[in-house]
Image: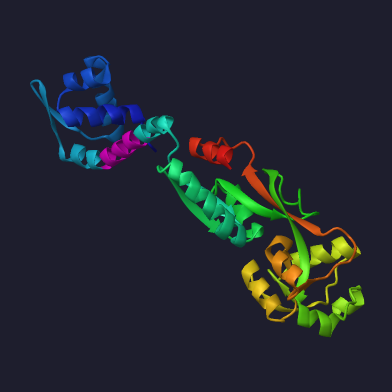
């Protein structure tokens, strides 16, 4: 059972000054209050902590052991309180952010660099990965903020403790090399023609491909042959250019190749699927000054 911290605080101060009177002055309490607190602590611990010699208190070996336990805690507490006080002068501390691999590697790092030029006392820990991995970490308090891919139909699923707001949208296209398009599709974009092709996806769950097919054809096609699974847009893009198969990529990343011709997109006549990069936060969590400043700058 833990003892009353106020009594430990009195003990700590007495030990430092070896005087009840000096401790009373330091703590702004009466000397009798100091003596009573020390007496209660000794009775509670069932051991003598000081030998009283006139106006001086001589610590026992038990007092020395107790001080070794209490002193690091008090020092850490004082440092922490000083840090909180200093935080009022500007954002500081560590900001823990989760993000998709490509967004985190490209966009987020640029934002972090620009932010730290203005607030050098803020440090960042960035975790890159799939929302299914990062959302539980946000819920568990391991992350302060999360940027996540939120596809249509996914919003609201498994997100009860979070607030979600869209910060970026991007059109997604199903693309392949011009050579693959001419030899395998020959201009046919109906499901029967696509079903016999090779595909590239970001996870074994095939969420990107499933969402594309549901958006354009109203249903998914579970029998697709996925020949490459890699959680990297750049890797998927390189595989597309290499003629490995069909993959989902943000349209703006292949805009030049689509215009020049080495990459072809499967167009169905429907608007392209939109991917939302959303800011996800834990509901009810008070934002630190660093977090507030980052969100305002973002």
Say if the magenta span includes residue 76: yes
Percent coordinates x, y for residue 287 in the rendering: 55, 36
Identify the image quadrant of residue 292.
Answer: top right
Is 104 left or right of 290, judged from the image as shown? right
Tell me if I can see residue 232 in this picture.
no
Drawn side of residue 112 relative to residue 19, left or right: right
At x 73%, y 76%, the residue is: 262
Q: In the image, which residues are magenta?
A: 69-80
Residue at left 22%, top 42%? 65
Tell me which corner region of the image, top left, top right, bottom left or bottom right, holds residue 199.
bottom right
- Please, is residue 15 above or below residue 37 in the view? below
Q: Quadrant of residue 170?
A: bottom right
- 54 to the left or right of 30: left
> Is there any visible trace of residue 201 in the rendered image?
yes
217 over 152 or under it: above or below: below
Q: Please tell me which residue is depicted at 90% across the width and 65% down the height of the picture.
A: 217
**Measured from the top left, where is residue 107 in percent x and y?**
58, 54
Q: Residue furthest front?
A: 260
> What is the magenta segment's predominant secondary structure?
helix
Name the spot of residue 242 as percent of width and height, x first: 68, 81
């Amino acid at each position: 059972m833990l003892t009353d911290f106020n009594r430990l605080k009195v003990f700590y101060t007495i030990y430092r000054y070896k005087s009840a009177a000096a401790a009373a002055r330091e703590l702004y309490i009466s000397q009798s209050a100091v003596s009573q607190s020390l007496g209660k602590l000794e009775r509670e611990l069932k051991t003598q902590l000081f030998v009283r010699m006139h106006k001086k208190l001589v610590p026992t070996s038990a007092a020395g052991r107790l001080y070794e336990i209490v002193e690091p805690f008090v020092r850490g507490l004082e440092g922490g309180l000083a840090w909180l006080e200093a935080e009022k002068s500007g954002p500081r501390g560590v900001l823990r952010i989760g993000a998709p691999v490509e967004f985190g590697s490209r966009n987020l790092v640029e934002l972090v660099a620009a932010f730290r030029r203005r607030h050098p006392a803020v440090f960042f820990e960035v975790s890159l990965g799939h929302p299914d991995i990062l959302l539980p970490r946000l819920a568990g308090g391991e992350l302060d903020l999360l940027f996540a891919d939120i596809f249509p139909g996914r919003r609201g699923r498994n997100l009860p403790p979070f607030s979600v707001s869209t910060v970026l949208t991007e059109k997604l296209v199903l693309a392949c090399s011009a050579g693959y398009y001419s030899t395998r599709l020959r201009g046919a974009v109906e499901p029967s023609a696509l079903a016999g092709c090779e595909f590239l996806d970001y996870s074994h769950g095939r969420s990107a491909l499933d969402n594309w097919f549901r958006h354009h054809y109203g249903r998914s096609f579970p029998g697709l042959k996925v020949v490459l699974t890699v959680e990297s847009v750049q890797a998927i893009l390189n595989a597309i250019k290499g003629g490995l198969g069909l993959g989902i990529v943000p349209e703006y990343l292949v805009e030049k190749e689509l215009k020049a011709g080495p990459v072809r997109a499967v167009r169905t006549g429907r608007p392209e699927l939109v991917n939302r990069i959303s800011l996800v936060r834990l509901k009810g969590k008070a934002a630190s000054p660093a977090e507030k400043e980052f969100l305002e700058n973002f």
